[in-house]
Image (spheres, rainbow, N blue to C red):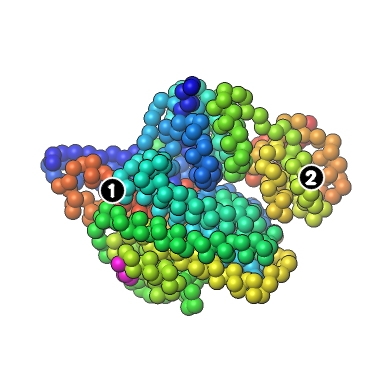
């Protein structure tokens, strides 16, 4: 290989949003290696100023198309925390179904459309149509459709849900719809297993790279946490004072990115499916544990490329969990509940949720008339940017003797493994209103 | 057979939810690529070509560097389609336009050293047609998948796509919904362009106006609605700011 080369990936493809990778090597030494986010900042927290508490959910949903259900739920939890709204058990169960649907939708999109092409040696999913992998593509499409239709059924729409409102749901699914969904979920377990086998057969393409880092996710006593839980770290354990989440998520500014970075106990930490797996894997459903076994994935895994595999494990878990949730809902019978009414007061509320890419936090301060005066959103991808950079800094020297094209692909695969959501991460920023 | 039109999809400042709606066409994407060649779609493919007939542009325009990129896309495309509310009317990004630009930048970046950094050179949020001419619009936040298919099919056949010019109320009535005003909600259905199948009121939620205001709203009827439900002009103006900031004055009060 040559001693001098440069890699410049402008607007990395098959990720959500705009990010660049830059690598300059001179005389075999790295002169510059930088992951930067170049998406235009969008000032969401500034836009929440003066909005009524009922409007915060529909506006923050627009931070991200892929995780709009997650943003909606973090938003509702923050608003309901501020206004002491206690949701019903039925609402909590349905919201868990909603978050499962979104997690499945987002994970299968990433596994199938964004990450798998690298493992199968193509530039996108399109060339796979009509190839020997045609059957795999159809399986991915089938699972993606199921996840989307599930979200449509619970939320009224997958992208920017409609039915999720303060205190409950504007419209409820019927018993008949839930039964039909449950049947399809049951059938999709074997499809998921088949897909896992195909990915397993090419998993030697996943680089065997590790770097010890800190993992942060929510943890709950009685379930693999998505909708509810307390902050937890592989380094420092549980942190129950959720309103002081900033002690964990210390965000800071870097000039080459329109997205903030974050650090806690070390120079960086990671959130997302692998972080959740590393902290909570013993709470996975049996089928999900089997998928993990197929890939020999065990906690704690320090290989970021395994995040995609952890997503596959979670996909199976979400299916199994949703089947159980529907059982509970139907046992109790769907009641025609109206949303719990909020009593407006001056207050601050914080909502924490695990979304496909990791820990998401919304934090609102409302005035006595129920209008927002201050807002802060902590986005999963922002928490991962520093970790991506440090992974690159360890990875490149390990592979520097490979051809530049291969180094470029490996770096692209690394960023894609994090499944970054760059629209989210440039929602921008801590705002202090005067 | 005539060569298939070459389509490129681009995104600017937005949530990429409308592109996701395209991915969510599932098996129907296979039908779509029967009639057009997708030559660039960064969100899902690595391949890219600068040789295209139809450019589909998603997102609002915020920075000079983005304006330049958009002009370049326009110069290469025979037809330019604006995709989704951020591109067609500026969308939620325009909410912040109600404040002085300098004040927003200072409020957001504080003392961080962003001066002279082109990544942060942000001006007011703009719709695509405020920078370059737009040939066709696919409205909505997010877009309606069926409408997307209709527009692309029409363009592939060399026809002019038609989008509704009547209000959401027409589709809402067709769905036999109870009027949101009757339920005590404030709905923008009477003045918002249809084409969404009235999806929000059909899910028992008021219309937010994401498809933009219709050109010639029946203002007499709107005033009657406001009067009947004892709502003020101020209410309609406030509701309009989510998607139609700066548009409500000329559209409603004529």
Give the chain letter at badge 2: B
Q: Nearer the viewer, residue B128 or B204?
A: B204
Q: What is the x, y in percent for residue B83?
A: 56, 36
Q: Quadrant of residue B217?
A: top right
> Measured along the vertical axis of the image, is residue A248 above or below residue A24?
below
Q: Which residue is mark 1?
A: A411
A81, B170: nearer the viewer: B170
Give the Cα distance between marks 2 and 1.
Answer: 53 Å
Query: Residue at (83%, 45%) from the top-left corner?
Result: B226
Looking at the picture, tell me which residue is in the foreground, A166 or A150: A150
A264 relative position to A186: left or right: left
Q: Which residue has dot 2 on it?
A: B173
Res A341 visible: no
Q: Position of residue A379 (x, y in %)?
A: 46, 56
Q: Which segment did they paint magenta? A: A296-300
Q: Chain of mark 1?
A: A
Q: Residue furthest bottom?
A: A221
Pick the residue in front: B9 or A381.
Answer: B9
């Amino acid at each position: 290989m040559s001693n001098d080369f440069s890699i410049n990936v402008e607007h990395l493809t098959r990720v959500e949003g705009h990010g660049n990778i830059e690598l300059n090597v001179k005389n075999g030494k790295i002169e510059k290696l930088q992951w930067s986010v170049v998406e235009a900042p969008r000032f969401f927290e500034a836009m929440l100023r003066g909005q009524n508490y009922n409007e915060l959910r529909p506006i923050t949903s627009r931070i991200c198309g892929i995780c709009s259900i997650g943003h909606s739920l973090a938003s509702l939890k923050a608003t309901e925390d501020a206004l002491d709204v206690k949701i019903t058990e039925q609402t909590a169960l349905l919201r868990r179904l909603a978050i499962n649907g979104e997690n499945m939708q987002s994970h299968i999109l990433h596994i199938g459309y964004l990450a798998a092409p690298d493992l199968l040696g193509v530039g996108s999913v399109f060339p796979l149509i009509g190839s020997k992998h045609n059957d795999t593509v159809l399986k991915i499409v089938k699972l993606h459709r199921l996840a989307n239709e599930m979200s449509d059924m619970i939320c009224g729409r997958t992208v920017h849900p409609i039915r999720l409102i303060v205190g409950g749901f504007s419209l409820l699914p019927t018993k008949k719809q839930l039964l039909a969904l449950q049947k399809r979920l049951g059938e999709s377990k074997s499809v998921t297993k088949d897909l896992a086998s195909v990915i397993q057969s090419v998993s030697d393409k996943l680089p065997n790279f590790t770097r010890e880092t800190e993992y942060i996710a929510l943890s709950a006593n009685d379930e693999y946490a998505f909708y509810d839980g307390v902050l937890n770290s592989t380094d420092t354990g549980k942190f129950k004072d959720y309103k002081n989440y900033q002690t964990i998520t210390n965000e800071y500014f870097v000039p080459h990115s329109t997205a903030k970075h974050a650090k806690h106990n070390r120079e960086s930490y990671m959130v997302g499916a692998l972080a959740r797996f590393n902290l909570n894997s013993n709470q996975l459903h049996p089928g999900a544990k089997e998928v993990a076994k197929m890939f020999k994935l065990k906690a704690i895994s320090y290989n970021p490329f395994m995040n995609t595999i952890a997503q596959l494990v979670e996909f199976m878990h979400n299916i199994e969990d949703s089947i159980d949730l529907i059982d509970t809902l139907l046992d109790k019978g769907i009641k025609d509940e109206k949303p719990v009414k909020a009593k407006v007061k001056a207050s601050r509320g914080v909502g924490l949720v695990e979304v496909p890419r990791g820990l998401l936090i919304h934090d609102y301060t409302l005035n006595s008339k129920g209008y927002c005066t201050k807002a802060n959103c902590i986005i999963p991808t922002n928490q991962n940017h520093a970790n991506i950079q440090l992974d690159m800094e360890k990875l490149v020297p390990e592979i520097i003797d490979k051809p530049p094209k291969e180094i470029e692909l490996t770096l692209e695969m690394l960023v894609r493994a994090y499944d970054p959501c760059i629209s989210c991460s440039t929602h921008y920023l801590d705002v202090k209103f005067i | 057979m005539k060569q298939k039109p070459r389509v490129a999809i681009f995104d600017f400042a937005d949530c990429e939810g409308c592109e996701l709606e395209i991915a969510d066409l599932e098996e129907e994407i296979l039908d779509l690529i029967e009639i057009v060649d997708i030559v660039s779609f960064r969100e899902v493919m690595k391949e890219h070509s600068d040789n295209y007939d139809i450019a589909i542009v998603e997102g609002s325009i915020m920075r000079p560097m983005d304006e330049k990129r958009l002009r370049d896309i326009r110069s290469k495309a025979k037809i330019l389609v604006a995709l989704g509310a951020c591109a067609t009317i500026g969308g939620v990004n325009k909410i912040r336009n109600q404040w002085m630009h300098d004040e927003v930048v200072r409020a957001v970046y504080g003392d961080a050293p962003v001066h002279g950094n082109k990544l942060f050179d942000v001006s007011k949020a703009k719709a695509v047609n405020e920078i370059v001419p737009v040939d066709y619009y696919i409205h909505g936040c997010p877009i309606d998948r069926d409408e997307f298919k209709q527009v692309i099919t029409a363009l592939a056949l060399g026809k002019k796509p038609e989008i509704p010019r009547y209000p959401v109320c027409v589709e809402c009535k067709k769905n036999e919904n109870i009027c949101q005003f009757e339920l005590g909600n404030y709905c923008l259905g009477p003045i918002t362009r249809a084409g969404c199948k009235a999806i929000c009121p059909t899910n028992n939620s008021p219309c937010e106006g994401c498809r933009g205001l219709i050109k010639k709203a029946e203002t007499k009827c709107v005033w009657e609605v406001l009067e009947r439900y004892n709502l003020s002009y101020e209410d309609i103006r406030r509701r309009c700011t989510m998607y139609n900031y700066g548009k409500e004055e000329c559209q409603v009060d004529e």
